[in-house]
Image: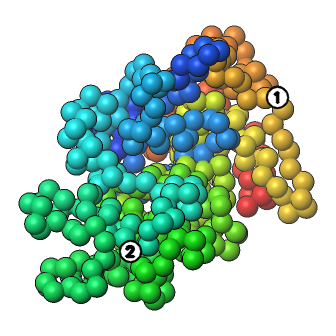
Amino acid sequence: MTEQVTGQVTGLLAVEELSLGFATEAGFASVLDHVSLEIGRGQVLGLVGESGCGKTTLARAILGVLPRDSARITGGRVLFRGSDLLTADQVMVNRTVRGRAITFVPQDPFTSFNPVFTVGEQIMEILKWKSPRASEPPGRRWLPALAVRYPSDRKRADFDAILELLDAVQLPRPKQLLAKYPHELSGGQRQRLMIAMALLPGPDLVIADEPTTALDVTIQAQILGLIRRLASERHVAVLLTTHDLGAAYEICDSVNVMYAGQDVESAPVDRFFAQPAHPYTTKLLASLPRDDGTASGIPGEVPRLIGPPAGCRFNPRCERADGPCREVRPPVEQLEAGHWVRCYHPHRGAARDAARDAARDAT
């Protein structure tokens, strides 16, 4: 949250005090409440929190794919390379940013593929519309499907570039794979393909929304390692939304924590696990299963987003809450470089050390 503390934006992407919600039959659901984050090139930022905390909604707001009939943005900015995506010309944003400079890796790769077209046909269709060459005259654009022959050196170079990228995501026999249909591939292969397709346009930012949820544990580790390596090698920023703290620990440079639509803490990953400050963060880390199989839950329930609690939304479940916590949302307190918290009574000293020990036992 450098932009909130210094007033300057230094990252590739900076979300500033973003608030939005959805109109429902029961009333207005305030899904994001003044949420901020920042991410630079080559960094992997983990956006963590319980299901329903607003992680995916924030990702969709950045992508610009919120439902137009019900979503309402009530404040804030989404700055990408210095331009506000919310107020910029949307035709230009769709042409040059979404799907090109910013791409997406979904949670379930199987439902994201068209089952009646081969993998190669779908890759070429993406490049037809989203590669830099899509702005060239029609006669020079990418073909919508793989050609049997590649008479020009240019098409051969394009095809070789695709094979090179499939090799980079560790897919064996890429030529044969391009001729297959999605149902003929394993879950891990489909997710690797999704990562490759997200990288095809040469993006600056990839948003990965719970990319390992549908995979078994062994494949999860492989996909996470692949994302980390590609981010470093290609200098691509990655926003990883996850409820899995283990995944965040493995590959993230820093972690932002969300609770019920509010951001509550952000820190470099080592400091996040060693010295958590917000009461919710400490309880979240303490709830991880220990070596003996036990875990401590968080008492209470996540509040409804229609008419949520005033102030800090965690206050009904927090033993440290007092009057101000229930009235006004806490301001940002900078604890150390890169580590901030929104709390009137953050954990310090012995309480923080206890949370740290619980987190270490769990990981």
Quadrant location, the N terminus: top left
Q: Residues within 10 Å of mark 2 (few under 14, many from 20)?
A: many
Placement of 239 over or under 122, stated as above or below: above
Callout in the foreground (2, 1): 2
Instruction: Tell me the SS state at disc 2.
Output: helix
Spatial separation of the CA atoms under disc 2 and disc 1: 49 Å
Placement of 333 over or under 10, stated as above or below: above
Which residue position is annotated with label 1? 300
Residue 361 seen in the figure: yes
Please name the residue shown 39% across and 48% down the image. Answer: 39
Disc 2 + disc 1, Cβ < 8 Å: no
Please name the residue shown 20% across and 41% down the image. Answer: 92
Using the image as rendered, state which of residue 290 and residue 274 is in the foreground: 290
Using the image as rendered, state which of residue 144 and residue 255 is in the foreground: 144
Which residue position is annotated with label 2? 120
Measured as percent of width and height from the top left, residue 89 is found at 21, 33
Relative side of 245 to 232, left or right: right
Kind of residue indicated by mark 1: Gly
Which quarter of the figure has residue 139? bottom left
Quadrant location, the C terminus: bottom right
Relative side of 314 to 129, left or right: right
Which quarter of the figure has residue 31? top right
Measured as percent of width and height from the top left, residue 299 is found at 84, 32
Kind of residue indicated by mark 2: Gly
Placement of 127 over or under 323, stated as above or below: below
